[in-house]
Image (cartoon, rainbow, N blue to C red):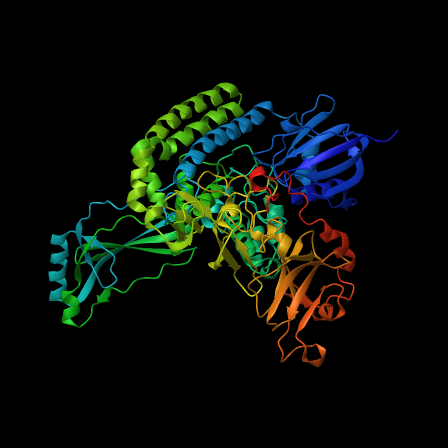
Amino acid sequence: MAPPKVLMIAEKPSIALSIASTISGGQMHSRKGTTEVHEFEGMFNGFPAYFKVTSVTGHVFRRFKSSFQRIIWLFLGAKCTGFQAKDDRRKVYRARFSSVTEKDILKAMNCLVEPNEYEALAVDARQEIDLKVGVAFTRFQTSYFQGKYGNLDSRFHASIGILFRSLESLNLEKIWAVSNSYPWVLCTEVALMFQKLVLQDRILEVTDISEKQESKGRPPGLNTVNLLKVYMVDSKAENYDDQTCSFLSYPRTESTAYPSSFDFKGTLGVLANNPMWGDYVQGLLSGGYHKPQSGKDAGDHPPITPMRSANEDMLERDSWRLYQYVCQHFLGTVSPDCKYTRREIYLRGFLFESLMHHYGASAVRLSSRFSLPDNTKGLENIVDLGQTVPPDYLSESELISLMEKNGIGTDASISVHINNICERNYVQVQAGRKLVPTALGITLIRGYQCIDPDLCLPDIRGFIEQQITLVAKGEADHSCVVQHVLEQFKRKFIYFVKQIDNMDALFEAQFSPLADSGRAFSKCGKCLRYMKYISSQPSRLYCGTCEEVYYLPQKGTIKLYKELTCPLDNFELLIFAMAGPEGKSFPLCPLCYNNPPFEGIDALFGASKTGGSGMLGKGAGMPCFLCPHPTCRHSLIAQGVCACPECNGTLVLDPVSAPKWRLYCNMCNCLVLLPQGAHRISTTRERCPECDSTIIEVDFNKNTTPLEDGATLHVGCILCDDLLHSLVEVKHGKSFFKRAGKWARARGRGAYRGRGRGFGKMDPKMSFRDF
C-alpha cells in the first residue's frame, strides 16, 4: 500500500524551500510550476509519508481537489489562517512557527494544531468591509471627478484612505534668538540683556560646570513597524527579497520581546566571524552579553534578528543596508546601556547644557572661556529677529508612528498604505523622505472635512480594527460586526452623495474645467466642431459641444493624419507615435478607439482603461491596425502584410515611416525593416499565391536601386520574392539579425489566412454590404 500523501503549503516560495530542506534533510526533488514544489519521503506523526511542499502567492479561496490524505497548512502570516483549506474528508493542520530555523520548524511539526475559525472569520470580516466600503466610495468619487477637469490627472482614484491635513494656517509669533550658531531661543528682554553683557567684554567666563552621569537603556527587540520607521526603501520593505530572507528571520512580527527559549548565544555565534563587527561580538561572548529589555509579546513571532553572516559583497545595496541595520540593532539589544555625561555650564549666570555621549570613556572637558569675535558689528548682530515657523511635513517614519498609535493598518499593510497615497498622487516624497501633500490630496481632505470629518480621521479605522480583533479572539460575532460597520458606512455614503457638490466646489477652485483646457485640435464627427486636445495625463480629446471625452494612447505624440476621416463615423484620423527609435506609429479614429464598432476587439494599445464612466465603451480600444474594415485603406485588411514571426499577430505597414520604411506587429514589439531609402512602399490588393501574404509595391530611389537597367519599380512578396526577402531585416528589442531565407514562409501561408477572424458578431449599422 502506498504511503499517505501530505501536502504542505507555506506562505511564500522561500519559506517553502526552507521548510522542505529542513524536514527532508536536503534530500528532496524540486520541480517548477506556478510555484516550486519540493517532494520527498519522510515521517509524519510516526508513520511513513510522501511529502509535497509548495506555497501560495496570495489568498486561498477554494477547497483543494486532490487525493491527498493529509493537508498541513504552514501558517506564517497574518492573512492566511489555514481555515480556507478545511475539508470534511481530509485532516487539515496548522503549524505555528516562531522563526524559520531548524529548531522551530521541527518543534512546530511536533505541535500541530487545528485551524482557528475565529481568525479566519476576522480575515473575512476585514476583506468584506474594505471591499464594500472602498468600492462604494472610490467608484462614486472617481466616476464623478475623473475627466471633469483638464489639469486634474484623470487616472486618480479618490479613495477613502490616509491623507494629510494642511498646515497652512498657523499663528506666527515673533521671537529673539542668539545667532552665531548658538541655538538658544530667548524672550526679547532677556536677549537684549544678554547682548548688553556681551558687549561689555568680548570674553565670556565659565563660572561653574556641573556634571551628571546618565544612561540610556538598550533597545528592545526589533519588530516590523520599527524596522519600517528607519528603513522605508519601498512599499514592501517588510517582505524582503528572497536573497535577504535567507539571512534574516521572519520579517512580519509585532513582538519586541524575545521568547524565553531564544538562543542569544547561537545568534551571536553566527556573527562572531563577521568582518565588520566580529571583534565586538567576540567581546560580548567572552565578557558576557546582557539580557534584552522586556518588550511587547504579541504572541506571533520573535523580533527580527540575523540568521546568517553576510558581507557587503554578498547582497545588493538596499538588502545590505537592511541586513546591516538588523544586525546592529540586535547587537544593541544585548550590549551594555549607553552611558553619557550631562554637563551644565554657567556663563555669567546664564545656564546652558551640553551632552557628551560616550561608552565608558571619560568625558572631554570644555574650555573655561568662550572667545567671541573681535568685530564689534558681529557683537551688535548677535541678537536676531525671527519668527516661529509651521511644523514640518510628516516624514515616513513619523507617519508610521502615528498609524501605529491610532491602530491604522498592520505590520504587513502600513507600508502598502503609504505607497498607495504616493501612487495616487495624494502626496509626493521629497528630500528627507518628507511626505508633502499635493493639490489633489489637500482638496480631497478639505472636501471630506467639509462633508463628513469622520472620513479623514483615524478614529473610525481604529474602531474597525478593534472590532476585527474581537472577532479574531472569539469575543464578537463576525456577522454582527460586519453588518454594523456596513450599516454605518451606508448612512455615511448616502449623505456623502447628497453633499458631493460641496467637494466639487473645492475642485472647481483648484482645477480648470475641461472647457477651459487644451487647444483646438481635430474635428468631431458628430457636430463637426473642433475638439480640444488636453495633454495632461492621460491625454484626451474633449468636445465642448457634445460634452464627450475621447481617451488616446499614452506615452507618445499625437498629430493629425493629413485631414483624413474615418469612413465609419467621419471623425478626423490621428497618428500616434510612440517614443524612441523603435516606437510604432499608427493611425486611429478617436471614436472607434474609445467605442470599437466591432464586438470582440478588446486588445488595448497604450490607453487608459478607465474613462469618465470607468470604461472605454463596448471594447477597450481599437486603432486602425485592428480594424477589419474591408475597404478603408488604413485598416488591418488594407495595411496588413503577413503573419508575425514572433507571435500570432499581423505585420502591418507603418504609414508614416518613410524613408526608413518598416512593418510592425499589431500585437508584439517585432519590427521588420523594409528596403531603406525607397521613395514609396505601399500594399496592393493582390495576394501571394504561395503564402497568401499581401503583395507590396516598392518604388526604389533611382540612385540606390538594386534593380537592373536602373529600374525603380518592383512588385513582390517579402517572404517569397528573393530580391525583397534579401533586403528585409527583423528587429526585435535591441537585437538585429537577418532572418534565414525560409523565414515565415511556413507560417505565412495559413497564419495570415486567418486575418479578420475572431472578431465576433458585427454591429448591424456597421455592415459592409452597401460599400
Query: Is 351 on the left-hand or right-hand side of 5?
Result: left
In which image quadrant can residue 400 be found? top left
* Residue at 70% in and 59% down: 686
> Which residue is at 74% across, 63% downward?
719
Q: Position of residue 157 (x, y in %)?
A: 44, 41
| Image-quadrant location for residue 733 | bottom right
Query: At 32% across and 37% down in the image, what residue appears?
Result: 503
Where is residue 379? Give x, y as percent.
15, 67
- Relative to 177, does residue 403 appear above or below in the rendering? above
Q: Could you say where residue 572 lies in the image, as x and y percent from the top left?
A: 47, 53
Residue 222 picture location, percent across and down: 51, 44
Q: Is residue 667 visible?
A: no
The N terminus lies in which quarter of the figure?
Answer: top right
Vertical relation: 27 (above or below) 675: above
In terms of depth relative to the viewer, which is nearer, 429 or 577? 577
Task: Note whether residue 38 is visible.
Answer: yes
Q: Is residue 537 above or below residue 722?
A: above
Name the one closer to the observer, 156 or 712. Answer: 712
Question: On the image, which quarter does residue 158 sit in?
Answer: top left
- Nearer-the-camera pick, 24 or 206: 24
Residue 411 is left or right of residue 752, and the answer is: left
Instruction: Name the side, left or right, on which 63 lies relative to 656.
Output: right
